[in-house]
Image (spheres, rainbow, N blue to C red):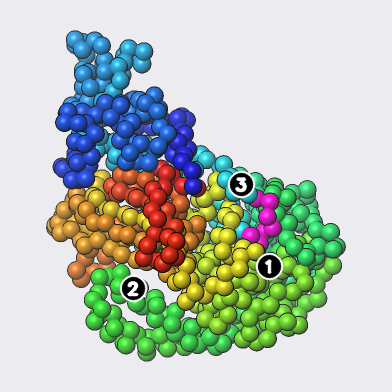
Amino acid sequence: MGSKGMGSCLPPCGNWLMVPVPPFHPVCKAPKLVEEEFKEFAEGRDNMTVKDMTKYMRDKQGESTVTEEEVRNLMERFIDALMRSSSSRHLRQLGVSNSNRGFRSPGSSKSLKQELLAVERSGREPPTFTLPLFLKFLLNPIYNGHRSASLYPPSKTVSENMTAPLSDYYIFASHNTYLTGNQLTSKSSTEPIVNALKSGCRVIEIDCWNGPGGTIKVTHGNTLTKSVGFEDCIQAIKNNAFVASEYPVIVTIENHLSQANQKQAAQVLKRVLKKDMFIPSPSDRPPVAFLSPEALKKKIIISDKPPGDSVLTQVMEEPEFTENMVAGALLHRSSSSGSSSEDESKSLRGGKKTRRRQIQVAESKLSPISDEDSSSQDEPRDPEFEELLYIHCQKPSEMVERQKKGGPLVPGQHAIMANLSESQLDDHIKSHPKDLIEFSKKNLARVYPFGLRFDSSNADPMDAWSHGIQVAAINMQGKDRAVWISRALFSKNGGCGYVKKPDILLPGSTATLNHESFKNLHSKLELKVRVLMGTDWHRNYDLFKKPDYFVKVAVHGMYDDGLKKHTKWIKRSREPHWDKEFTFQIRVPELAILRLEVKEHDTFLRDDMVGQSCVPVTGLRQGIRAVKLQSKKGEHRNSKLLCEFRLTSLSPSNSGTMSSVNREPVPGCWG
């Protein structure tokens, strides 16, 4: 991990950055750490010069190769932006004056703001930061954000080798992409398909059924969801496939069509997609090994998907998993409302009857429609449709020649995509974790949410990724933590929708991984997160008292890399100072995601969700950084945290013991 300089770690100088700093918010008191570092680098003076800031950024912020000229430009750009959004009174409060801004004509009769805006850059001397201005700079997520420059929206620079087979990459995937809401009654539309593609998704799923008058409709079968036309969906994919990324889009078609409609679907695909569609040669249906994302650049790949088991079938075949899933939802609901562990245990005991009632209700509602359109599953395949398929998808029950019921997934002579339900993945993780990883080294594997997730919620995709599974299909309309984590992982590698799997999960790795053997791996990275303060809250959460904020700090990662911690809640403070440090030892940093989630504590009601931020651990910037929060839906909010991040690479000592490591500071940003 070599040092990276200013150019790769700081935001670029493009016009997108020339936006006003958010309106002035009077910060009552700088955190103790900020005061200490200001005093240290200002060397007892009332302000920090460009030289002081350069030394600070090199020594504390991890920007080891930054130059004084770059720091001067950054400080000037920041103050210029501040001018556009702050009054003269606010500027004086921050200590911005003719003297510290470096202007040569202080005698002007104009207001401070007018004069600062009027003077040409050529008449300026080097800027300085007072303590309030230094704090304002640190709190600005544009100029001092916690994400590395490679994760900023304008960056589409692919940093990983894209010439390996598709099976070597995690692929950003959506589930039932056409749905606008829940899985039972929502509307089908092309809009969520367009949104998914624009957000970087590379796997689009459409369920195709026989419509009236020989038409093809896209809908969630055996539910009350409204349909959308098949050709409309394909046209939307064609128009938006390569807006966010040039790398291949995989269209998975769940085929409930008659043979005649399969032929019609093939003709629509050819007519609309034309040269954008990848048509494999007969010897590659299916291939011995998948082509690379680079070789398939700007191509749309067609994959079939076997009709999934009905919800009733899933419930009947996996009663234990069903009860556990509902129990988990009840536990999450009680813990989110601030309940004690005693209350949670009562909730779970009382919830047993509730779980059974919910399952019975689901069975009764789904029984009348579960067998509708089942005849389409027995329809013969149309040759014209079959010749378009590059990725052949199979359920474990269809791998009859090599798959025993309840046994591990066994690779065949050709590369395919295994299609697993959430409950089937759970079974394989418990019984055959090493075989799951081995299967995914040559083949693709896809996991989709359990059928009872009517609200379009999701399972934790980290369970799939930790076992080498490339395609964790996400209900993007769910807006839950699984969506945040997926967006965070796929913000890597230029946001192209493909992220290389860790070496430990790739072909050639001799590691035999399971939960126990993972504990014997040495930690590669130590992450320290010090939560300093929060400010600029976008709304009030209590009418009759000041808010009680607390922060959840979690790392989502492979096996024991995943840990969850939290600060205490600060009573009745609009500007809480926690000054709490958390330490994480991470074995597979390539897969680790840091989640910061702010909540407002309520004693009797469910805690209010204030905002969240998820970022790859390898995409963090060192030092004291501003963390801009987002809503559940990913919308940006003014609310932000100020945190210190320290990353230290760890290597085993000669003795090979976990307790003794060699420590080496990590450069300013990773990845």
> With 431 as the anchor, is 380 left or right in this view?
right
Kindly identify the residue that appears in the image at 19 percent across and 40 percent down: 35
Kindly identify the residue that appears in the image at 22 percent across and 25 percent down: 96
Of residues 496 and 251, which is closer to you in this image? Answer: 496
Kindly identify the residue that appears in the image at 53 percent across and 77 percent down: 429
Kindly identify the residue that appears in the image at 40 percent across and 85 percent down: 355
Q: Position of residue 574 (x, y in %)?
A: 18, 50
Which circle marks residue 245 in the picture? 3
Q: Position of residue 228 (x, y in %)?
A: 63, 61
Task: Give the quadrant of residue 330.
Answer: bottom left
Residues marked 1 and 3 touching at CB (< 8 Å) = no
Q: Secondary structure at mark 3?
A: loop
Within 10 Å of disc 3 (Cα), the crowding (few <14, some 14-19, many 20+) is many
Q: Position of residue 428 (x, y in %)?
A: 57, 79
User: Does residue 336 show up?
Assistant: yes
Residue type, label 3: Ser
Mark 1, residue position? 443
The boundaries of the magenta stretch are 162-168
Which circle marks residue 333 in the picture? 2
Task: Give the quadrant of residue 332.
Answer: bottom left
Residue type, label 1: Asn
Which of marks 1 and 2 precedes in the sequence? 2
Q: How many marks?
A: 3
